[in-house]
Image: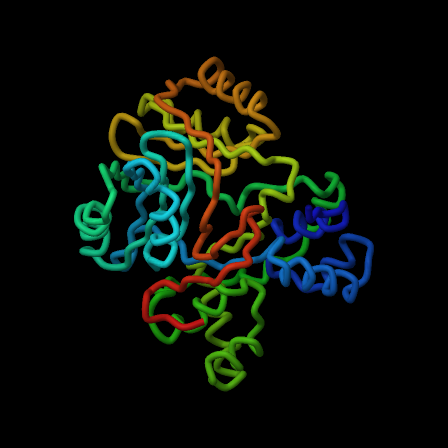
Amino acid sequence: MATLDEDDFSLIHALQIRPRATWTDLAAALGTSPTTLSRRWERLRADGSAWVIGHPRVRGHHGASLAIAEISCVSGRTGTLAQELAEWPMIITIEEAARDYGLIVTAVGLGPGDMPKLLLDDLSALPGVLGVRAHHVARLHLDASSWRVGGLDHERAQAVARIPDHGGGPSTPVNPWAEPYAGITQALIKNGRSSAADIARQTGRPLSTSRRQLGQLLASDSLTFRCEVAQGLTPLPIVVQTWCQVPVGAVAECVSRLRTTPGVRQVVGLPGPTNLLISTWARSAESAMLLHEHLQRDLALKVVESAIILRQIKRLGWRLDELGRATGPLVPYPPNASV
């Protein structure tokens, strides 16, 4: 089975902290050479073991919305349906669990009618679908861009964090889905480390125009960048999704403590009585159970349901293989986008 070594994890951790840092800056922080880092990264990216993605933030601006749907299927239909949904551009993430509502998908909509049509009509109409439980995302308290693989010691992690964030500068809101930024956004979804020269080649625009528009897009804070890693190549093979009830007055404190809880990768705020969804990566089923116990014992929340994810089919548009490597095609969104 393919594996990652310590130097691979160090580089991935560094790119999780500063996804668009130059190889020169990263080499100085890590005590190596730019050429060594560049070659290592190209190998990791080429075989799908790790990749950087720039994804538009969904904040309800410009009519955009985010939802999580749990889908129940007739026996034997779940895997086939997951592969079918992987071709749908609106479905950006797909996970499969051993439970009645065995498919857990994340969807993004750009217009006010996109999400109701998907959740109320399109998913329910699919052959073999028995039911759909939909949750609109009210707030993304903690997203996976904050999660770290743990390949660096504290000193080197701090050195990487001191690298200037090249996305900084005056922030002027822009719509990343609209021109003149849509083509740049698609390039950054495919490769979050794309340079202005890369984007100029892909879009056919002059280099000076691409550089200016890329700078405007990065400064707007309209995108979030993260370095992903194939989960099957990490020492954390267990994914658990946990639906919780938290008293409204305790949500802020609960989220604050979850930010520093090892293994917590994402925390999503949902409307309704089940108002928090926690995603964790764990070393074993036992450690996942211990974390589950910690949540109920030490935090002001009630666990409503948990699901161990057995298979990840798609993550932020990328089709994954059995180890979680991004070896399949990128399904672009919106549907008419090209990459």
**Which residue is outermost to the top?**
297
Name which residue lies at 63% across and 63% down.
46
The image shows residue 97 at horizontal and vertical percentages of 42, 35
Q: Decide if residue 132 is on the left or right side of residue 201.
A: left
Name which residue lies at 23% across and 47% down.
127
The image shows residue 140 at horizontal and vertical percentages of 39, 42
Q: Quadrant of the C terminus?
A: bottom left
The image shows residue 208 at horizontal and vertical percentages of 53, 83
Rendered image quadrant of residue 288: top right
The image shows residue 162 at horizontal and vertical percentages of 68, 51
Name which residue lies at 55% across and 24% down.
285
Q: Decide if residue 260 is on the left or right side of residue 119.
A: right
Task: Indicate whether 16 appears above or below 96.
Answer: below
Q: Decide if residue 235 is on the left or right side of residue 256.
A: right
Q: Decide if residue 335 is on the left or right side of residue 319.
A: left
Name which residue lies at 39% across and 52% down.
83
